[in-house]
Image: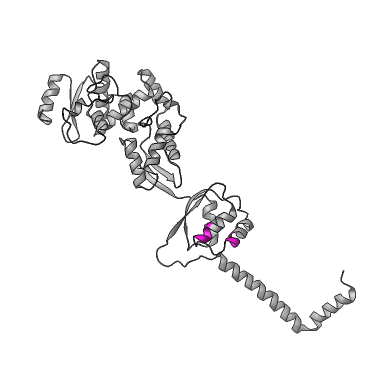
Amino acid sequence: MIPEREKRGIFECLFVNPIRLGVLILLIGAVWIGVRVYIAYLSAPVSARTGPETFSTLTIVKGTSLREIGDLLARKKLIKSADFFVLYARWKGKERQIEAGSYRISSAWPLREILDRIVGGKVISYRVTIPEGYTAAQIGHLLAVKGIANEAAFQAALTSEEYDYPFLKGIPPGPNRLEGYLFPATYEFQAGLSEKEIIDQMLKTFQKAFTPELQQRAAQMGLSVRQVVILASLVEREAKLDRERPLIAAVFLNRLKNGMRLESCATIQYILGKQKEKLTYEDLKIPSPYNTYLNNGLPPGPIANPGLASIKAVLYPAEVKYLYFVARGDGSHVFSLTLREHEAAARQYVGE
C-alpha cells in the first residue's frame, strides 16, 4: 500500500501543479488517439477503391487455424497485419465462425468486410447448365472448360468412386456406369468441390427428379429404373421436338413388345463417340453391344443423360401403334405403322 504521506505527495504534485496535470492528460490523450489511428489504419483497405475492383481467391481448408488464415490474407496483400486480423477476429468473437471454402476477396475491402465474407460462408460458386442429352464425357469436358473440374479427374471419379444410391445397385463397374444418371439441370457449384462431390450433386438431383410416383409408374409398366433411363436416353438423342418425345418412346416400346430390334441411329452415334451427319451401312455393322441394329433388346446402358421430359415420355408414351420413324430433316419425324410406309418415307426424306 502507498503510505498516506506519499499519496498526499502525488496528489499535491498533480493538482497543486496544474502544468504537470495538463501534460499527463495530454500524454494519455495522445496515446489514446495514436492507438485509435493505428487501429483505423490496420482496419482500412489495403488499396483504395479506384476503378473496377480486382479480386483474389482465398481458399480456406477445413481445419486451418486463425493464424494461418491471417498469414494467408497478408501474403495475398488483402490485409495489412496478420497479427491484427487475429486480434480483431477474437475481439469480435468470430474466431470459430469462419467457414472453409473458396472466397473472392478484394484488397479494397476493409477488414470488417473481409471477416464478414469468410464468416458468412459467401463462397465462390460457378453457375453451369448441363444440357439434356449430354454424355458423361461431354459433361466432363464442359466442366473443364468452365474451370469447375479437371476432365481426367472427373472421368476417374465416374469410374472408381463409390456412390450409395438405390438406383445404382447392381450396375456393373466401368467408365460408363453412371451414364444416364448425371441429371441435366442448372447447378451452382461451390469452388473447391472435388469431382466426386460434383458428381454426387448430379446424382442427388436425379434421385429427386425420379420421384416415388415415377418409380411406381415404372413398376406398373414392368420396367426397372435403369430400363427407363436407357429408353429415355434413346428418346433424348432421337427427339428434337418436345411433342414428339411420347411418339418416339411409343415406337421403341412397341418394337420391344413385338420382339423387334430397336434400330436406333443414336446408339451408333454413341459407339462412334461423335455426331456424324449421315451414317453409312458400314456404320450400322460396327460390332458393339450398343449396336441396336445388330442386337435385340435394350443396349447395356444409357447412351446419354436424359432430362425429365424424356423420362416422362417413356413412362407416359403416346397411345399409338407406330413401329417406325424417319427424320424429315427439319427436326420433325414421319411415323409409320408398316415397313412399306417407312421405306416410302425414307426414300422421300433421306433418299434411300
Q: Position of residue 232 (x, y in %)?
A: 31, 28
Q: Position of residue 178 (x, y in %)?
A: 38, 31
Quadrant housing residue 92: bottom right
Q: Position of residue 9 (x, y in %)?
A: 85, 79
Q: Is residue 218 left or right of residue 62?
A: left
**Quadrant of the rendering where the C terminus is positioned:** top left
Quadrant housing residue 318: top left
Q: Residue at x 33, y 42 (%)?
A: 141
Is residue 308 visible from the viewing direction of this image? yes
Magenta span:
72-85
Q: Residue at x 28, y 19 (%)?
A: 297
Q: Is residue 97 left or right of residue 280?
A: right
Q: Is residue 121 left or right of residue 143?
A: right
The answer to whether 212 is drawn above or below residue 74 in the figure is above
Q: Residue at x 30, y 22 (%)?
A: 298
Of residues 329 and 135, the one drawn nearer to the viewer in this rendering:
135
Residue 252 within the segment the image draws in magenta: no
Of residues 85 and 220, the one drawn nearer to the viewer in this rendering:
85
Is residue 243 visible from the viewing direction of this image? no
Q: Position of residue 343 (x, y in %)?
A: 12, 23
Quadrant housing residue 3: bottom right
